[in-house]
Amino acid sequence: VVYCNARTTCPSRTTCCRSPFGVWYCCPFLMGQCCRDGRHCCRHGYRCDSTSTLCLR
């Protein structure tokens, strides 16, 4: 289990991400890169593009 804060958890081997509205969500990748839109994320070693819909290396 990954603890995002005192009340929110994500499954093991995932990453906690926080939306711009303060809501936590779980990225399915270990050490994932959270995108600014608060809905998407990328694998470790990749980054989100400016639209938060594509992952770039």
Image: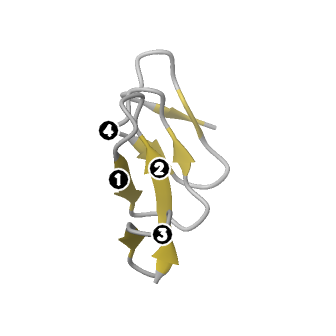
- Circles 1 and 4, Cβ within 8 Å, touching? The answer is yes
Q: Which element type, helix, strand or loop, lies under badge 4?
A: loop
Q: What amino acid is labelled 2 in the image?
A: Cys
Residue that label 4 marks: 39
The answer to whether 37 is drawn above or below residue 17 in the figure is above
**Residue displayed at 55% across by 55% down:** 32
Residue reaching furthest to the right: 45
Q: Which element type, helix, strand or loop, lies under badge 1?
A: strand
Say the numbered circle drawn on residue 16.
Answer: none
**Residue displayed at 47% across by 27% down:** 36
Residue that label 2 marks: 17
Q: Earlier in the sequence, mark 2 or mark 4?
A: 2
Tell me residue 24's x, y (percent): 38, 51
Callout in the foreground (2, 3) = 3
Q: Earlier in the sequence, mark 1 or mark 3?
A: 3
The answer to whether 7 is drawn above or below residue 18 in the figure is below
Q: What amino acid is labelled 4 in the image?
A: Arg
Mark 2 crowd level (few <14, some 14–19, many ≥20, 10 Å Cα): many
Q: Which element type, helix, strand or loop, lies under badge 3?
A: loop
Callout in the foreground (1, 3) = 3
| Disc 1 to disc 3, C-alpha distance | 14 Å
30 and 38: which one is in front? 38
27 and 6: which one is in front? 6
Q: What amino acid is labelled 3 in the image?
A: Ala
